[in-house]
């Protein structure tokens, strides 16, 4: 008996789940899902099978063949990170049926009231399962070591529609027979077939890690932007849909580019769902249906960059998956590399180099953040007792990228491209760890371990000396302008004439963490950064303003924290306020969080809470 993943109760001696069939009744009045989950295991099993759950009430567990109840127990004290272990006693079964309900506080789900939506007319709910939140939607072995296929029958109000990271099979009327287990659980009888209800069916035929399970339900509309791509938004958000369709018009070109570099696109469709502004990430690579924050739609290159990233996960992450979160760099480092290869082709090498520069800056900042927690600066890092949401950082992305680039630079692009294709073809639909990757690397590039210190890169702390700080005219120019700011020089209109959001972002991130308030205000007076429509620029600037104690900006900080829920913006602003040292800042942090909390996704609520509890 040994755990296979520090974030799961799954045991190495247990068979893994291969298929899940879910019936879900979504109750928007109570923010509860009444569900049944039929889990199929890779082989018959006798003994105690451990499952992960979080805030789930189990009503019964049955043998699906005999419909006899199966003994089970629910651990009485939930683990702070892993949630509640459920143990089912099997005697030779290879499947089990669990009837259960979720909780309104399920960590994967954000339930939006009509008032929180664009239309103000209909409710909305969406999921975010990575890293370990799928267990709050259905009991499962919530580890990427398990790869599952799934079928879903979802019962929703007929005024709404559902999308999933799966193939849409059909929309149809509910049938009484299919509700019998749910009604034996906690769902009132006849609700399943209520007049105002409809059923949507989905099927995911490729085996995926549970963290890629995803759905959204709302009043959705879409537009075709390519032969295998639609963009979805709330149907009332016509302007958002128009802007998104324009922004993502180049998606098909990127898919083709991805196929050229990494092999066939295996997921048939590549649709994009633009979520409400509370979506906690920039993008999430849910297969067949990427989830995106609306903040990336701003008419410049960043929208496409985030799509390039999530698209790249179709190969690195979704085809080859990290076996657990200790090897997260295998997902994000490779994907950041792949993203930049796509960007290089569709937006040009200058843009790709600028992105490497922004990433480099982010990486060096993380070294500062983790100077007392060096474990987090390792690619392969121990996460026993660690909440993945608390240690989320640029390290797996940017140090991972640097490692992949280091190999490319050693063997040359042509050889590396061939290696990448072979790596993907060899491990597709498999979950692997760092050692498996390194063995494959050494077997395919003989002698590589003599050229690159592989152990230092994957297990060492900090940034290895043979990492690559990018050089390009624009990058160097921006860095030197940022240095000059310290001596009191501001960039001239000429200097910034060609800058868009990413150039400003790089500039602002290279300024000292805290400056003279008068200088910060002068910069804003000239370039109106606090009012930028681009959140990267606005938030970088506001962060500088807060750490420089420019209290004039507290109103804008508050407004920003109340209109978006993307953690990339919440983290630096709340951290700056909480760390600033002044009581006024700390007070503001507490007050804004109290007011905005309910509008954030539960994952973001947890992250802000842990920032505030650390410093306040
Ligand atoms: N898979 C990640 C998002 C994620 C990571 C969710 C860990 C939960 C836990 C996604 O691919 C990602 O990296 N998104 C980035 C965008 C990107 C362009 C780097 C983001 O959200 O900022
Ligand atoms: Zn990613």
Image (cartoon, rainbow, N blue to C red):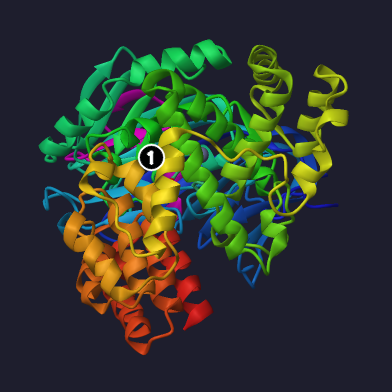
- Image position of 140 with respect to 369: above or below: above
Q: Is residue 567 left or right of residue 545?
A: right
Please rate how many residues cluster around mark 1, counting C-alpha atoms within 10 Å: few if below 14, some from 14 to 19, many from 20. Answer: some
Residue 478: x %, y % from top left: 40, 45
Residue found at x 44% / y 34% = 473
Residue receiving disc 1: 215
Residue 531: x %, y % from top left: 18, 57
- In the rendered image, the residue lying farthest to the bottom is 583
Q: Is residue 316 left or right of residue 450?
A: left
Choose top left, top right, bottom left or bottom right for residue 187: bottom left
- Image position of 304 with respect to 213: above or below: above
Q: Is residue 37 left or right of residue 519?
A: right
Choose top left, top right, bottom left or bottom right for residue 236: top left
Residue 40 visible: no
Q: Nearer the viewer, residue 406 or 86?
A: 406
The magenta stretch spans residue 161? yes
Residue 226: x %, y % from top left: 29, 15
Q: Is residue 584 left or right of residue 87?
A: left
- Image position of 306 with respect to 349: above or below: below
Residue found at x 64% / y 16% = 413
Residue 515: x %, y % from top left: 38, 70
SS of the residue under disc 1: strand
Q: Nearer the viewer, residue 432 or 216?
A: 432
Residue 443 visible: yes
Q: Nearer the viewer, residue 370 or 326?
A: 370
Magenta residues (range): 157-185
The magenta stretch spans residue 303? no
Choose top left, top right, bottom left or bottom right for residue 588: bottom left
Residue found at x 34% / y 74% = 516
């Amino acid at each position: 008996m040994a755990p296979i993943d520090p974030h799961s109760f799954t045991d190495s001696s247990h068979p893994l789940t291969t298929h899940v069939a879910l019936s879900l009744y979504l109750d928007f009045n109570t923010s509860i899902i009444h569900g049944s989950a039929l889990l199929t295991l890779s082989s018959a099993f006798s003994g105690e099978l451990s499952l992960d759950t979080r805030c789930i009430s189990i009503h019964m567990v049955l043998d699906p063949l005999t419909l006899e109840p199966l003994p089970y127990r629910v651990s009485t004290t939930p683990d702070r990170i892993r949630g509640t272990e459920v143990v089912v006693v099997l005697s030779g079964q290879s499947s089990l049926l669990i009837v259960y309900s979720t909780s309104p506080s399920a960590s994967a789900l954000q339930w939006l009231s009509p008032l929180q939506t664009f239309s103000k007319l209909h409710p909305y709910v969406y999921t975010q399962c990575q890293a370990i939140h799928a267990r709050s939607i259905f009991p499962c072995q919530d580890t990427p070591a398990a790869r599952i296929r799934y079928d879903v029958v979802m019962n929703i109000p007929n005024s709404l529609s559902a999308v999933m990271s799966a193939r849409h099979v059909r929309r149809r009327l509910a049938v009484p027979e299919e509700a019998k287990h749910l009604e034996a659980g906690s769902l009132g009888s006849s609700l399943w077939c209520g007049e105002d209800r409809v059923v949507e069916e989905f099927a995911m035929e490729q085996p995926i890690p549970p963290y890629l399970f995803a759905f959204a339900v709302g009043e959705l509309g879409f537009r075709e932007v390519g032969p295998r791509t639609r963009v979805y938004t709330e149907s009332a958000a016509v302007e958002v849909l128009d802007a998104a369709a324009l922004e993502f018009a180049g998606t098909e070109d990127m898919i083709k580019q991805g196929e050229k570099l990494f092999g066939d696109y295996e997921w048939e469709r590549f649709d994009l769902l633009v979520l409400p502004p509370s979506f906690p990430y920039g993008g999430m690579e849910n297969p067949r249906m990427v989830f995106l924050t609306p903040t990336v739609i701003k008419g410049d290159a960043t929208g496409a960059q985030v799509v390039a990233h999530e698209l790249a996960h179709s190969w690195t992450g979704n085809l080859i998956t990290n076996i657990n979160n200790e090897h997260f760099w295998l997902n994000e480092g490779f994907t950041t590399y792949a993203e930049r290869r796509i960007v290089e082709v569709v937006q040009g090498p200058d843009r790709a180099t600028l992105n490497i520069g922004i990433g480099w800056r982010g990486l060096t900042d993380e070294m500062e953040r983790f100077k007392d927690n060096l474990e987090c600066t390792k690619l392969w890092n121990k996460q026993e007792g660690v909440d993945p949401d608390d240690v989320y950082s640029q390290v797996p992305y940017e140090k991972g990228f640097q490692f992949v680039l280091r190999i490319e630079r050693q063997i040359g692009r042509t050889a590396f491209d061939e290696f990448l294709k072979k790596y993907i073809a060899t491990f597709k639909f498999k979950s692997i760890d760092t050692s498996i990757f390194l063995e494959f690397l050494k077997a395919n590039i003989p002698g590589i371990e003599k050229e690159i210190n592989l152990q230092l890169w994957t297990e060492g702390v900090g940034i290895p000396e043979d990492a690559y700080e990018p050089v390009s005219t624009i990058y160097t120019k921006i860095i030197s302008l940022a240095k000059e700011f310290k001596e009191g020089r501001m960039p001239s209109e000429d200097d910034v004439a060609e800058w868009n959001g990413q150039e400003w972002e790089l500039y602002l991130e290279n300024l000292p963490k805290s400056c003279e308030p008068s200088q910060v205000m002068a910069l804003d007076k000239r370039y109106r950064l606090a009012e930028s429509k681009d959140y990267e620029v606005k938030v970088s600037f506001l962060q500088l303003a807060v750490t420089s104690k420019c209290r004039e900006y507290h109103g804008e900080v508050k407004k920003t924290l109340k209109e978006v829920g993307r953690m990339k913006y919440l983290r630096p602003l709340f951290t700056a306020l909480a760390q600033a040292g002044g009581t006024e800042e700390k007070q503001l942090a507490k007050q804004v969080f109290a007011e905005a909390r309910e509008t954030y996704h539960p994952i973001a609520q947890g992250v802000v809470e842990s920032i505030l509890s650390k410093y306040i």
